[in-house]
Image (spheres, rainbow, N blue to C red):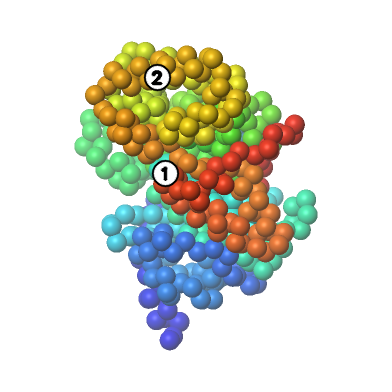
Amino acid sequence: MTENTKKINEGWNFNNSYAQLPEKFYTKQELNPVSNPEFIVFNERLAEELGLHTEALRGAESAAVFGGNRVPEGAEPLAQAYAGHQFGHFTMLGDGRAILLGEQMTPQGERVDIQLKGSGRTAYSRRGDGLASVGPMLREYIMSEAMHALGIPTTRSLAVVATGEPVYRETELPGAVLTRVAASHLRVGTFQFAAQWGTLEELQALADYTINRHYPELIDAENRYLALLEAVMKRQIRLITKWQLAGFIHGVMNTDNMAISGETIDYGPCAFMDTYDPMTVFSSIDREGRYAYGNQPYIGAWNLTRLAESLLPLIDENEQQAIKLVEDTLGHYSALYRDSWLDGMRAKLGIFNEEEQDMALAEELLSLMQKHQADYTNTFVALTFGKLEQGGLLCTSEFAKWLEQWQARLDRQSQSREEVEQLMRSSNPAVIPRNHRVEEALDAAVKQGDYSVMEKLLDALADPYAHRLEQAEYATPPVRSDRPYRTFCGT
């Protein structure tokens, strides 16, 4: 079989609209070949959804694509420019270690970015080497696929390829490239870049492109740019609500890490909460708790305000009028988030209708969980199946009083207990990617070259609402330790 035939059989179907934007927004990029690209993990199910031919993608020729050695047919590699507030400080950024190969058109007619992460230096690398090591790339693979299975909007991971080359950090590490799939890589920081360094025409081109790609229903809106802000706000609310309900902590909610599409993007120091505590922070660099679990909804609003500032010239020629329109729109954020979160919490508690005291009921449970250091995920699973014989919170008189109130609340709705349990089963996952389990899988992969631990973990996480018996071992919290768990941005 010839190389050209292989390219056809791989199933690539690129249509690269981002490359039609003004060149200010990107730099065309040569690939950075590596010495020995080899698959570590390949997401066949996702590949099939993208219209790729898995049989043709298993060999060395395709590993060369995912390692950055060969440009697939129809791709137009580039690195995107953007800016962002990093821990509140504004700076110029860009794809310093990522190359966008292009946009794959799927059999369903969807357009998705195919990006190589850790693929070497770009025009925006500054002093960095643009490389990545096996551990962080496998971490993103595990976390993003777990988030997808949980029903949380997210970028996806198509493959991780070992490069056969070392990466130098504190020690020498094995290099790797992750292939990320995203609705797009448009960020709040992309708009900040356009507003800061672009012309009004370039800012408008970016906004129109975003509407056409992600919000086509807004094309004929009376004020399409104000409508864009509102639409992005609603998607961010939906996303952060799902984070909070699942106990997920992103860890680095900088404006350059907030996708306009409403997907979770850039899995660096992220982790899932075990013991419930709103001030939970895992990131080693978040010393002030800016991005703590309980702060995520507020940071979401802060980031949207930065987006709104970027859009002001498009919303109205009169700056004061634009500010008023923006303030009116963002003024709905808190109430919309509250309603979204409460709807999700009602489902976790098996509540189908609405009563005024539902917020107090939910908040009281969380207060008790925090006081008694209860496991967030397992407490809701225990409530789902009525397995309340465990120690800790579930044996306290305070919880017994709350339980009576909750059961009385369930009695005031028409749904049967079977219907209640089904709603709770589908809202409360049996398993999450527990931090100690993720570390166990990464240690085996990086230190021993053993990927079986990761494969078993991925299998357990693939259907978190199944509540299968074999998932039980992955639901066990870690042994309590005096040393807090810490995550790192990791490259």
Relative horizontal placement of residue 435, taking residue 204 as reference (left or right): right
CB atoms of marks 2 and 1 within 8 Å: no
Q: Please state, as top left, top right, bottom left or bottom right, where the N terminus lies in the image.
A: bottom left
Tell me the kind of residue under disc 2.
Answer: Trp
- Report if residue 273 is visible in the image: yes
Question: What secondary structure is found at the residue carrying circle 2?
Answer: helix
**Residue 232 seen in the figure:** no
Above or below residue 131? Residue 37 is below
- Report the residue that reaches farthest toward the right: 171
Image position of 7 (left or right of 366): left
- Residue that carries the numbered disc 2 in the rendered image: 406
- Residue placed most toward the observer, 288 or 460: 460
Q: CA distance from mark 2 to mark 1?
A: 22 Å
- Give the residue at mark 1: 465
- Residue 110 is left or right of residue 379, and the answer is left
Q: Is residue 158 above or below residue 8?
A: above
How many labels sit on residues? 2
Q: Of the residues shown, which amino acid type is indicated by label 1?
A: Tyr
Q: Residue at x 36, y 60 (%)?
A: 49
Sequence-earlier tag: 2 or 1 = 2
Quadrant of the rendered structure where residue 237 is? top left
**Residue 174, horizontal then vertical, whole percent:** 69, 61
Badge 2, how many Cα within 10 Å: few under 14, some, many 20+? some
Q: Residue at x 65, y 63 (%)?
A: 450
Left or right of 443? Residue 119 is: left
Residue 298, percent from left and from top: 50, 24
Mark 2 or 1: the one toward you: 2
Tell me the residue at 52%/42% (across/down). Answer: 432
